[in-house]
Image (spheres, grey):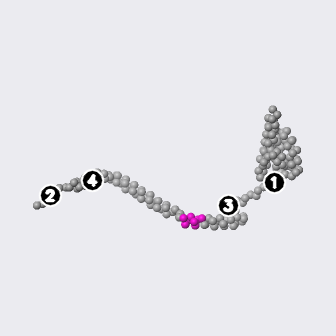
Amino acid sequence: MTTRRTPKKGTSQALASIRKMLETLPSKSEREELRNAAAELADFFLELQSLLAQVPSLEDAAAASRALQRLADALDRRRGNRAVTALLGARSRPTQRTFPAPTEDDSRTAKALIAELRSMPGDSIRERLTDKENFPVRLLVALSNELGLRISSRPVRDAIIQQIATSIVNQRGYQSLRST
């Protein structure tokens, strides 16, 4: 006597699950899209792997640091050599141009000039002080000192003349304001 088996509940559930799964399978175009996306993802990881292989290691950085230090030492040893400096394209520092300090005679002349300059308009003061023969930088520095002006350690002629003229014109303006 053969008995016929009836499907059990578990089997019918499995079949139902398989049917549902079959309904969710992608179409040919969807499958192709997934395949292309997976290929792009694989290419990305290959490129990432290549880039990571090129990242320097701690040992590489230490070697580069030592090489830079050796280069700096070599350049320091040859710093005074003009031929090497010119070959490397480095410019030598220009020597600082300093002017002689004003003498006592310059200070006396400056005191006398201040009274004369105070009676002149600002443009006339600037014009008169631009005469290089009669007003060397040393005398301009003495004028600045007598007026109580601070000048840079590397005085520039035009800047000093501008400071002197402005100071005299400003002093004249302050005096006229006080008298009114």
Q: CA distance from mark 1 to mark 4?
A: 100 Å
Residue 9 figure quarter: bottom left
Single out the mark in the foreground, 2 or 1: 2
**Nearer to me, 73 or 1:** 1
Q: Residue furthest top?
A: 180
Q: CA distance from mark 2 to mark 1?
A: 123 Å
Magenta highlight on residue 161:
no
Residue 100 appears at what percent x and percent y?
83, 54
> Residue at horizontal 29%, vertical 53%?
21
Q: CA distance from mark 4 to mark 3?
A: 79 Å
Disc 4 packing (10 Å; few <14; some 14–19; many ≥20)? few
Disc 1 packing (10 Å; few <14; some 14–19; many ≥20)? few
Amino acid on which disc 1 is placed: Phe
Residue named by callout 2: 4
Q: Residue furthest left?
A: 1
Q: Earlier in the sequence, mark 3 or mark 1?
A: 3
Amino acid on which disc 3 is placed: Gly
Identify the mark at residue 99; answer none if there is no mark.
Answer: 1
Label 3: element kind: loop
**Nearer to me, 18 or 98:** 18
Q: Earlier in the sequence, mark 2 or mark 1?
A: 2
* Image position of 92 (left or right of 33): right
Identify the mark at residue 89; answer none if there is no mark.
Answer: 3
Residue named by callout 4: 17
